[in-house]
Amino acid sequence: MEHGYHGTTTNIKALRISAILIFVYFIFEIIVAFITHSLALLADAAHELSTVVAIGISLIAIELGARKPTPERTFGFLRLEVVAAFVNGLLLLGMAGFILTRGFNRVMHPIEIPSTPMFIVGIGGIGLEIAALYIMYRGQKENLNIRGAFWHVVNAFMGSIAVILAATFIFFGRVFVADAWAGIIFAFVLIWASYGLIRDSFNILIDTTPKNIYLVDIERDLKNINGVIETHHLHARAVAENIKTFSGHLIVKDLKDSERILREAKEILDIKYKFSLSTIQLENEELAESDTKELEYGERDHVDH
Ligand SMILES: [Zn+2]
């Protein structure tokens, strides 16, 4: 972490306070949602829960990120953050599915829903979300984990607005179906949020070449090094969102040039492409290899971003 100990402690405190506030509110909202049968409240509560989980992930990531790797876990717990984001994405998707099924059912058979509890919960939510955004505002500029949590709360803010809008329609026009529609619309926000989470974490989990890294460019740069004939087994991966690693084999004309070639390759990988860790193997043409063919990629089947 680039910032000092003091900055980290402040950020952890901000996240912890926000998580506790939102969790207490979630309990309150889910109880009111079950009593009133309001789908808008249920959808908003689902989102609050996923926000608490997301902030929890940030906290764990900051905590575990400070822990040193061991010989048994050479990457420490860095990927745990990715696994947790994936699970949170699935959780959101499941909740969205549940709300959508209930929502369309409710559009067909609307039921009477009291608007006063909706107003109270919605306004309470807005107050709380503004407080959480205020607490996290400074930290989100310098820490990626906090930025993720920050945007979660921005979405939660929209959820509270949806609850208040639905309550307004019910209060002034007795349009009870407004509650179902607010739930349905917000369920789509949940699906959208879960899609980003699932896609990004899944790509890291299956070792997809990280975003904004084009292996074809790297291959070209490595081949341009004087003395390099061919490259193979090039792999770029992300251990966690910000830690990218590279490995590859270079066939060189003369192994006597190893030192210079390695230095130039390192410069390309570490400085130009900003890999946290790069591993290069130099080979000459006579070196017989039994490299597995399953890991070779063809010219045309690299993944496009
Ligand atoms: Zn090789």
Image: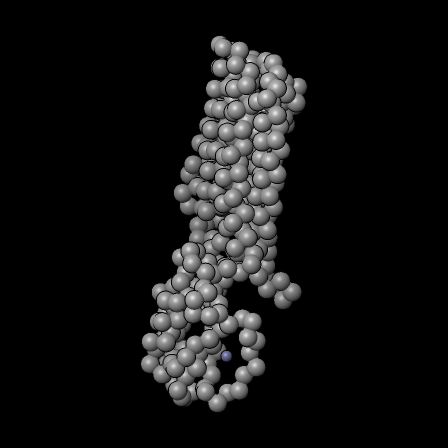
Residue at 53% across / 38% down in the picture? 191
Q: Is residue 116 above or below residue 25?
A: above
Tell me if I can see residue 122 in this picture. Answer: no
- Give the position of the C terminus as an image quadrant: bottom left
Q: Nearer the viewer, residue 207 or 177?
A: 177
The residue shown at (61%, 25%) is 105
Q: Is residue 297 left or right of residue 261?
A: right
Residue 279: x and y in percent read 48, 72
Furthest-front residue in this view: 108
Residue visible at 62% across and 33% down in the picture: 98
Q: Nearer the viewer, residue 129 or 191?
A: 191
x, y percentage for residue 102?
62, 28
Q: Position of residue 144 (x, y in %)?
A: 46, 47
Rendered residue at 44%/31% (across/down): 134
Decide if residue 192 is on the left or right side of residue 52. left
- Figure check: 82 above or below 267: above
Is residue 268 positioned above or below 179 on the image?
below
Where does residue 140 sit, x and y in percent of width and height?
Answer: 44, 41
Could you say which is closer to the camera, residue 137 or residue 186? 186
Residue 107: name its quadrant. top right
Colour pattern:
one colour
> Does residue 248 appear in this view?
yes
Give the tally of numbered discs.
0
